[in-house]
Image: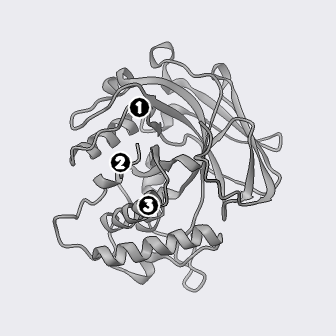
Amino acid sequence: MNTVSGNAASTDAASTDTAFPDTVAAELAGELHAAEQRRVQIGQFSARFPGMTADDGYRVSRAWLELKLREGRAVRGHKIGLTSRAMQQVAGFSEPDYGTLLDDMFFSDGDQIPFGRFIVPRVEVELAFVLGRPLRGPGVTIIDVLRATDYLVPAFEIIDARIERVDPESGATRRIQDTIADNAASAGVVLGGRPVTPDSIDPRWVGALLYRNGVIEETGIAAGVLNHPANGVAWLANRFGRWGQPLEAGEVLLGGSFTRPVDARPGDVVHADFGPLGSISFRFTDDPADDRTDGGAT
């Protein structure tokens, strides 16, 4: 799956006028990549380019993905964000957003994850859909998603911000355009617990308790994700379908968080109890970034 999967479908404005020529998108993608390598945040793109649109953000995201693929990374799946009405209202955006999951972003249940790999990491709990066959929009429904899904599995998403959340001079908060450009904030994935087939449970009623260092920080239920966690996957398949791009068999799709993100610190032990679906956990170590080239967990 070493293709520009999905983000090839990200250039809504590819055939129309846009504030960003490809050269600017590539330059900003390079800044994001350098920020990730240095573990230092950069200023908000939307402050530098007041006319920046969500489509421009996806152009930057695509350029960043192309850079990663040239370095040898491979696409393993996608994440869907802004899946709650409350978060969409905060962001001033009426639909979800999405990012790409690369092979070196995956970790295993119980892993010791170097905190220094990230800048300001936070953790969310989600359900991951692992596709058994492709999904090709338009017209994909949640029934199609459930039929195409091989199994569901508990997941953590580690989100990060290469772009400052708050501008230190103006106090302005980061806009949705910045988050989209920043791969929808996606930085890591931990899969674990008990995989289940979609017909063996009602995914809406999957709940989770999110612990940090033995203290429950957040609780949630999957119905909070667009009324059904499969709705986000259907939305993504239909969005990609505009450009003839399917969601491929074997891809991991994070359907959206059903808790608020929890801030993380070096040494934190993060644990999520998904009830009948088991539990997953990991620990942030004080180690520097691992700069893995082995493609991450399988």
**For the residue marked with disc 1, what is the amino acid?**
Ala
Give the residue number, with chain letter if any, for mark 1: 230
Which is nearer the eye, 205 or 162?
A: 162
Give the residue number, with chain letter if any, for mark 2: 5
Q: Rate crowding at label 2 as few (under 14), some (14 to 19) or many (20 or more) other CA atoms within 10 Å.
A: many
Residue placed furthest toward the bottom? 169
The quadrant in which the N terminus is found is top left
SS label for mark 1: helix
Image position of 140 with respect to 76: above or below? above
Eye-nearest disc, 3 or 2: 3
Give the residue number, with chain letter if any, for mark 3: 70
Give the residue at x 16% y 64%.
15
Give the residue at x 56% y 79%.
167
Q: Give how far apart the Cα atoms at labels 2 and 1 are.
A: 20 Å
Eye-nearest disc, 1 or 3: 3
- Is tag 2's residue or tag 1's residue first in the polypeptide sequence? 2
Image position of 236 with respect to 87: above or below? above
Residue 250 located left or right of residue 7 = right
The x, y position of residue 235, in whole percent, is 33, 41
Image position of 80 with respect to 64: above or below? above
Q: Is residue 191 visible?
A: yes
Which is nearer the eye, 118 or 277?
A: 118
The x, y position of residue 191, in whole percent, is 61, 35
Q: Give how far apart the Cα atoms at labels 3 and 2 are.
A: 14 Å
Q: Give how far apart the Cα atoms at labels 1 and 3 are.
A: 32 Å
The quadrant in which the C terminus is found is top right
Give the residue at x 29% y 39%.
246
Residue 105 located left or right of residue 73 = right
- Is tag 3's residue or tag 2's residue first in the polypeptide sequence? 2
Residue placed furthest toward the top? 200
Query: Exactly how many numbered labels are in the figure?
Result: 3
